[in-house]
Amino acid sequence: MKANRCRNPIIVVDDLYVNFYTYAGVVKAIDGVSFCIERGETYCLVGETGCGKSVTSRALTRLILPPGKIERGRILYYPEPGKVVDIMKLSEEELRMIRGDEITYIFQDPGTALDPLYTIGYQISETMLVHGYINKIRKGVSRAIQLLKETLIPDPEQRIKSYPHELSGGMKQRAVIATSLANRPRLIIADEPTTALDATVQAQIMELLRNLKKKRGLTILLITHNMGLVAEMCDRVGVMYAGQLVEEAPTEELFRNPLHPYTRALLRAVPNPLRRIEKLESIPGTVPNLIYPPAGCRFHPRCAHVMDTCKRQKPELTRIGNKHYVSCWLYSRR
């Protein structure tokens, strides 16, 4: 899968491999993942916990710390149409000018994303200071207040003086979003931004992200395992399993016509409030140990359609219809 799969990409990931070198062995966390994100869209990565979604998102700006290592692959960033930056060839200093400025993150847990020793206003202003938008922290105060207003935090003039422990979970997440918007982001990577929040606040945060995207013309990479959020927020979906991308399609197409056995099983496991179900369906077996992953298709030990080829050789992503790709020998053989 190459860059030309997107007409106007903002980022392209091609054949990415990431390993973690632990005492127990080498964890093959990402195995040949390739995808691209169109400028202005919301692209989702979904899958079970531990399938590699967060590792993939951190690899986009080389935020893989030891014992992790990006073994190989290309990551191409397009700040403007026709202009390309090879992330893997940048120096650390050059990358820092992009990370936190043009590509920003909203992490899972706002409690750990914020430093407990500094006020919210200081942390938002520090982001602007690092990237040269201001030359003194105090000059960022008015901009920080405006950002808190934009993220709908009440009484922002007082909240910039607050420490993280003085805010609720929803307000902390809004402060993290404000920090991610502080400079000039083109791509926001939202890594399960509603995990630690209750249902009402989740809806508020996602509505906020949708409105900010429309207002600022942002591109969003949303990482989640909540299929309801996928249906509501996303333009295209990439389904990951055990470090591999097994299916990719426009959201409506994926829900209407899931092809990969794992995708179908994942959707069947979601409760349907419109049907009476006595017992939820589950996927048999367990997630493989990525120190010793299965050969071929990593889903084959749990697949009801397994063939001999599945056990020996990894299937390539195959195009099935318009913008619908699947990595499965059921379709490769066809």
Image (tube, rainbow, N blue to C red):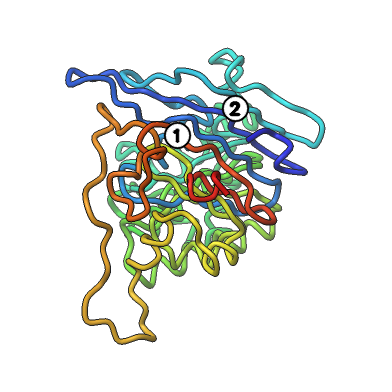
The one of 281 and 40 positioned closer to us in this rendering: 281
Residue at the image position 69 percent from the left and 24 percent from the top = 85
Q: Residue 314, which numbered label?
A: 1
In this picture, residue 9 sits left or right of residue 108:
right
Q: Position of residue 98 (x, y in %)?
A: 61, 28
Q: Position of residue 328 (x, y in %)?
A: 48, 46
Q: Give, as a three-letter code, the residue at label 2.
A: Ile
Q: Quadrant of residue 300?
A: top left
> Does the image show residue 114?
no
The residues tagged by marks 2 and 1 sit, at their Cα atoms, a distance apart of 22 Å
In this picture, residue 10 sits left or right of residue 168:
right
Q: Which mark is nearer the camera, 2 or 1?
A: 1
Q: Residue 75, which numbered label?
A: 2
Please tell me whether mark 2 sits on a helix, a strand or a loop: strand
Q: Is residue 98 above or below residue 90?
A: below
User: The N terminus is located in which quarter?
Assistant: top right
Mark 1 is surrounded, within 10 Å at the Cα level, by few (under 14), some (14 to 19) or many (20 or more) other residues, namely: some
Q: Give, as a three-letter code, the residue at label 1.
A: Lys
Please tell me whether mark 1 sits on a helix, a strand or a loop: loop
